[in-house]
Image: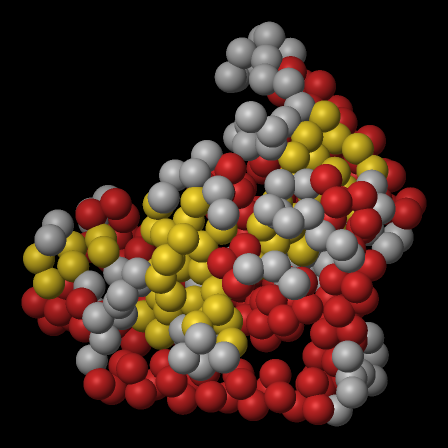
Amino acid sequence: MTSRIGIIGVGPVGAAAAYALLLQHVARELWLADIKLDRRDGQVRDLADVAAVVADPKSPGGGARATVRAATHHEVAAECDIIVITAGSKYTIGETSMQHLYRKVSIVRSIVAAMQPIRRDAVLLVVSNPVDLLTSLVKEMAGLPAGQVLGTGTELDGVRLRALVASEMGTPASSINLNVVGVHGPSQLATWSTATVNDQPLQQTLLSTHHPTLLADECKRRSEAIVHAKGSTEYGIAAVIARLCAAILDDTQSVHAVSHFQAEFGCCFSLPAVLGREGVVRTVAVELTEAERAEMERSVRLLRGRIGSVEGDGAV
Ligand SMILES: NC(=O)c1ccc[n+]([C@@H]2O[C@H](COP(=O)([O-])OP(=O)(O)OC[C@H]3O[C@@H](n4cnc5c(N)ncnc54)[C@H](O)[C@@H]3O)[C@@H](O)[C@H]2O)c1
């Protein structure tokens, strides 16, 4: 089986994703691209050492072989099974949030343009933020079937929230059925109304003793707190990238909360989806109360408005 993963943008997130993919033996080949060629080549050399250690028979896993090489955007697009987009830019002094958004949009648009033509069966995984807006734009530009373009969305938020609830309740996270859906960020929605622990409604247990809003807020604020403390947040999202890539390459048909195209809304946001070799196989219906649905739809309308404004302003 081929397993060639390309990563476009090897800053902290792209490099940590490569590291996780190597340690978990997800890909046999990693192709790295970045607009900064020195950084790309430095990351290739550093990660080639990781591949060498992993390939050593004394390492856990018994010496799985993988290679790491530098590539152009075009080579990644033409040859890789999965293309992970982690390119981004930090705020510069004096830049408004709108200017910064336009810069991020321009970066992603230039990447998709530089990649053409993209291998017809490639799956594109967008990580760069704002992930739903950028996944929507990539989906429009890539010229691939909608299911082959997805974003990391709220997968990490769901894992994080289940871990927080599990720790409050002193129960394993695996016993908790609770999703985070919608637009990744401040308006993402935790599906409290249908959440269960050990198949019992969570409402009757956790909710009587702990306020769910506090846990959901803690979940939303966690990334900001990590960035505040150390400047970037790469390990959690890297672990998520590795598991989504494994689900796709191994055709696991497992369910993940990824950002993907919703025809009814004309954009991408997170709902649970079955993942397989062709990307998103299908969306899994999620039960929401009327109030939850209204809240999610409100944030999706805002997302649509933002997509319309970056398209309309010629910023991209
Ligand atoms: N979705 C999530 O949950 C999540 C979590 C963490 C980070 N992120 C996002 O991941 C992205 C990357 O984070 P980071 O900390 O590594 O960012 P960073 O800005 O430190 O690094 C980005 C890298 O992209 C490269 N780049 C810029 N323009 C490029 C282009 N046109 N082609 C190729 N490479 C290009 C830069 O040279 C740099 O190496 C950000 O958008 C961040 O917000 C998302």
Which residue is found at the position 73% from the left and 59% from the top? 87
Q: Nearer the viewer, residue 251 or 144?
A: 144
Q: How is the image coloured?
A: secondary structure
Question: Do we see residue 23 in this rendering?
Answer: no
Q: Is residue 190 left or right of residue 71?
A: left
Horizontal side of 214 relative to 306 (left or right) equals left
Q: Position of residue 131 (x, y in %)?
A: 58, 68
Q: Nearer the viewer, residue 30 or 193?
A: 30
185 and 295: which is toward the camera: 295
- Give the camera-side residue of 312 and 98: 312
Q: In which quadrant will I find the C terminus?
A: bottom right
Compared with residue 291, is residue 238 higher up or lower down, i.e. above or below? Answer: above
> Image point 64% across, 49% down: which residue?
120
Q: Picture quarter containing residue 31? A: top right
Q: Residue furthest right?
A: 38
Lateral position of residue 138 relative to residue 100, left or right: left
Residue beneath the point at 74% across and 62% down: 112
In the rendered image, residue 290, in percent from the top left (x then y), is placed at: 22, 85
Judge from the rendering whether residue 197 lies leftward or rightward of residue 28; answer left or right: left
Q: Residue placed at 69% from the left, 85% from the top?
A: 310
Rendering coords of residue 132 (x, y %): 54, 71
| Percent x, y of residue 127 | 60, 59
Q: Quadrant of the N terminus?
A: top right
Determine if residue 123 is in view: yes
